[in-house]
Image (cartoon, grey):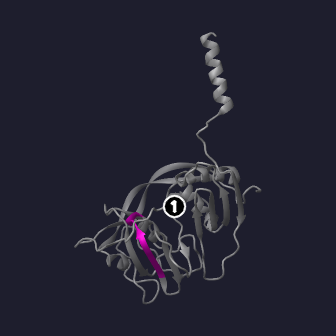
Amino acid sequence: MKPGSLCALMTWCAVVFGDTSKIAFEVASIKPAQPSPAGQMRIGLQADAAMLRYTNVSLKEVIRIAYRVKDFQIRGPDWIDSARFDIVAKLPAGASQDQIPEMLQDLLTERFTLATHRETKEHPIYALVVAKGGPKLKPAATAMPEPPGPVPAFGKGPMGRGAMMMMVDPNGVHLKAAAASLAALAEMISRFSERPVMDMTGVQGQYEFDLVFAPEAMHGMPGLLKTGPPPGDGGPAPAEASVDGAATIFDAVQRYGLKLEPRKAPVEIVVIDHIAREPTEN
């Protein structure tokens, strides 16, 4: 066979067989979630070696997990916060949970015609740092794996090992964790702050947390609590809580020898160029 013929054959094979490294769910069902009762929000995220089950999860949450980013790193239409779905998907044989984000990207592209690009911008943040006197942290009794893009569960019920439980009521936010890293804690409290929180403590490991505080904001969970005005750009932390009698987020983290400092930092943003409001049929 001539060299030119061999080259043409190899090119043809690449076109026919394509990228064999691509992985996708074998089958997936996406349905609109039932409306939550007034004043309540329950979100479930379960995944094992065979199945993925998301309950009442916002489209923004799915995008966040798919692209391995935080809420504040997503720019898109406001309705992706309120559009909620139940998703059940079967993982292919031999797939691992670490591959779920890539499979979700494929699912979002196929079913919601999602198209994105990335940008880097300066963004106001709160830096979670160690306060003067050092951290006051209680190591977790048993370290637990933290799945990519953890989704909190709201409402009453037992807290799973290695998970976080957040309860929201008119008195404020109760955040409890049996085993969580400071990076995971920063991500969780970002949901209740006017600025995203980024872990800059340099502290590794998992710890027990039990925080009660009044939120500055409720990202993606409108109507659960009335909130106060955002702090000024680059200004000091708010002096008053938005819920009478409840501590601020700043007070809550200080109990653990930590502090939130207003800063600016370069942040990579996932910009949504196109997304459909409704998925294609199952």
Task: Between residue 278 and residue 46, name the one nearer to us.
Answer: 46
Residue beneath the point at 45% across and 89% down: 244
Residue 175 picture quarter: bottom left
In x, y percent, where is residue 190? Answer: 46, 68
Q: Is residue 209 left or right of residue 155?
A: left
Q: How many marks?
A: 1
Residue under the image location 57 percent in, 70 percent down: 220
Of the 4 image quadrants, the one containing the C terminus is: bottom right
The reply to whether residue 210 is visible in this rendering is yes
Asked if one can make out residue 75 in the rendered structure from this viewpoint, the answer is: no
Which residues lie in the magenta part? Answer: 173-183
137 in magenta: no
Q: x, y (%) of residue 48?
A: 58, 59
Outermost left residue: 133
- Farthest right residue? 281
**Seen from this angle, which residue lies furthest top?**
2
Crowding at mark 1 (Cα within 10 Å: few <14, some 14-19, many 20+): many
User: What residue is shown at x 59% (from left), y 54% (from top)?
Assistant: 272
The residue sitting at 54% across, 53% down in the picture is 67
SS assignment at label 1: loop
Does residue 31 appear left or right of residue 232 in this picture? right
Q: Main secondary structure of the magenta part?
A: strand
**Residue type at numbered disc 1:** Gly
Tell me the residue that label 1 is attached to: 149
Q: Is residue 41 above or below residue 31?
A: below
Tell which of 238 and 88 is nearer to you: 88
In front here: 75 or 89? Answer: 89
* Residue 258, percent from left and from top: 31, 72
Q: Position of residue 106 (x, y in %)?
A: 63, 49
In which quadrant of the rendered image does the N terminus lie?
top right
